[in-house]
Image: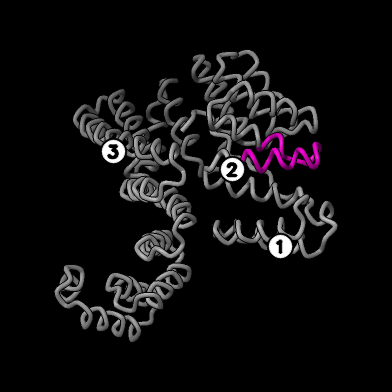
Amino acid sequence: MRKHVLIIILMLSACSSRESNPEVAKLIQASQAALELRDYHEALNLADSALTLDNQSADAYFMRGRIYFELQQWDNAEAAYLAVIKIDREYPGVRHNLGNIYYGQRQNRQALDQFIQAINDSAAAMSWHAAGAVYNVLSEPDSAVAAFRQAIVLDSLYAPAHTSLADWLEQQGSYTESLAHTRMALSIRPNHLADQVRRGRLLLRLGRSEEAVPLLQDIVIRYPRTAEPQYALGQALQQLGESDQSSRILAKADSLRAIEQAAGRLANTANRQPTNFQAQVDYATALRRSGRTEEALRVYLIARALRPNNINLQFHIANAKMALGSLEEAEQELLHILVTDSNYVLAWLSLGEIYVKTNRTALAREAWQKAFLIEPDHPAVQRLARQ
């Protein structure tokens, strides 16, 4: 992952007005709906169907670019966006999105060219912020900070610009100003982890450890498997003279950091090999085991686009959705598995859990009885029997 990740992918802002063929427009809208559900396989099929009807549809190519970007298939995404430009050089958002692809591939000069073109076409805060991120990578700090500030001038509520400027100011030792922008970013998106951790870290650097500790403790409770807040909390407690507690927390931070580094190596493999099914599954599983369930689900869904009918993967997706509280969606995933393979024991067990959580105890009992009849010696069935 790069330090300033640019994840802003502009939506189809005016597909109905740009698309004259109503059948094509309908397919593109359906593709967008599927993409919002992260059903990448269906989204791509619908976009391709639109192109079958009209191979000069800029909207359909733009849709393909968005889908392939989320699948991290950079070459396919680039080809789709270049096709958009060939059809309509002024298509909204295409330059910005193309810049994101080059940035993700560390083609920084090409990325900057696209972001500058996007600024020239329509001076939006997100494109100024993106240009600033590239300037930062290119070690042009004056240009970077000027771009971040210009993004804020254009849109004072654009949180990513405040976040990036706060990062830069912290690196320069301007802790008070960095804290102000961090707090502004948090007022816009209060649950952003990096800003929450930076706030605690800045308070620590400003000698305000007593303020930092409760904030960092709250983060650690919510993100117990993330190293950075543990490390910051350990430092804050150390400043307050809590040596024993600090040592324990710092040791835990070190162990978590080792786990994160291992996950990072899997992430690199998954990013380099976006069509490698097992690489995506391995990375997603590492994320899930480190408590990053929402990120894990995103990667599992990328893997599903590669093998839509893999029921073991469907089970991972169901469990991730269940862990995130999306019980209805998880239930549908499990029922789909059981239509394919009615002897899938783990699916029956998880379905029983969902039934219990939704106060359907008779159905839960029935699901668990089916699991016991199918494979009574399965370790998970045995654990349930002992409860």
Q: Which residue is mark 3?
A: 259
Q: Which residue is mark 2?
A: 76
Q: Quadrant of residue 385?
A: bottom left
What residue type is disc 2 on?
Asn
343 over 299 or under it: above or below:
below
Q: Are marks 2 and 3 in contact (CB under 8 Å)?
A: no
Of helix, strand and loop, which one carries label 1? Answer: helix
How is the structure coloured here?
A: one colour
Mark 2 residue crowding within 10 angstroms, few (<14) / some (14–19) / many (20+): some
The rendered magenta stretch, by its main secondary structure, is classed as helix
Mark 1 residue crowding within 10 angstroms, few (<14) / some (14–19) / many (20+): many
What residue type is disc 1 on?
Leu
Frontmost of labels 2 and 3 is: 2
Res. 139 mark: none
Residue, x 44% and y 51% (percent of image)?
Answer: 294
272 over 306 or under it: above or below:
above
The span shown in magenta is: 77-97
